[in-house]
Amino acid sequence: MKQKDHYRQVIRLVSGIGRLTNPQHLPALSDRGVSLSQFLVLDALSAATGALRMGELARQAGLTSTELSRVVSSLEDDAAVARRKDPEDSRGRLVALTAAGRRLHRTVEREATRDLRGVWEDFTHEEWHRFIDYLGRLEDGLQRVRG
């Protein structure tokens, strides 16, 4: 198989995984009324050591600034995030998870993991480590070429 065919295969697989992880296929998200975009924002904030500037959060969540503004507003309405002025730059805004947002993220992540358990129950421990390593390398490479 030629390298360009590998790229096509990866794009096809990643697209398929994206479609299958849409909230309509993840009851943990749809049951709690959490969109995929909202989950991506909650997940990015959960992984951060503190509040993130809107631009950095958009980059981390993979959303446009317009999408992010809409998603952050909806999460603010649900008291899952708090937005405040950046003390170092009054034009900028910082977004942080609230305690309710942290609980929501943990709950949805735990339930989504449970919902998907059957997908990976046949993986061996070694296969899991390799799979996680490969996904991490793919993510690092995507961040490098996009960043």
Image (tube, helix red, strand yellow):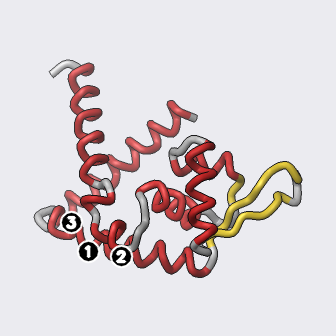
Q: In which quarter of the image is residue 51?
A: bottom right
Q: Which residue shows up at 50% across the image and 62% down it?
A: 43
SS at badge 2: helix
Mark 1 near mark 2, Cβ–Cβ under 8 Å? Answer: yes
- In the depicted structure, whether residue 16 falls above or below residue 10: below
Nearer-the-camera pick, 37 or 132:
37
Label ID, residue 110 = 2
Residue 87 screen position, x and y as percent: 87, 60
Residue 59 screen position, x and y as percent: 58, 45
Distance Cα–Cα, label 2 vs label 3 = 20 Å
Q: Which residue shows up at 17% across the image and 62% down it?
A: 119
Residue 71 screen position, x and y as percent: 56, 56
Residue 94 left/right relative to 28: right
Under mark 3, the amino acid is His
Under mark 1, the amino acid is Arg
Q: Which of marks 2 and 3 is nearer the N terminus?
A: 2
Label ID, residue 114 = 1
The residue under label 3 is 125
Q: Which of marks 3 and 1 is nearer the N terminus?
A: 1
- In the depicted structure, whether residue 35 falls above or below residue 69: below
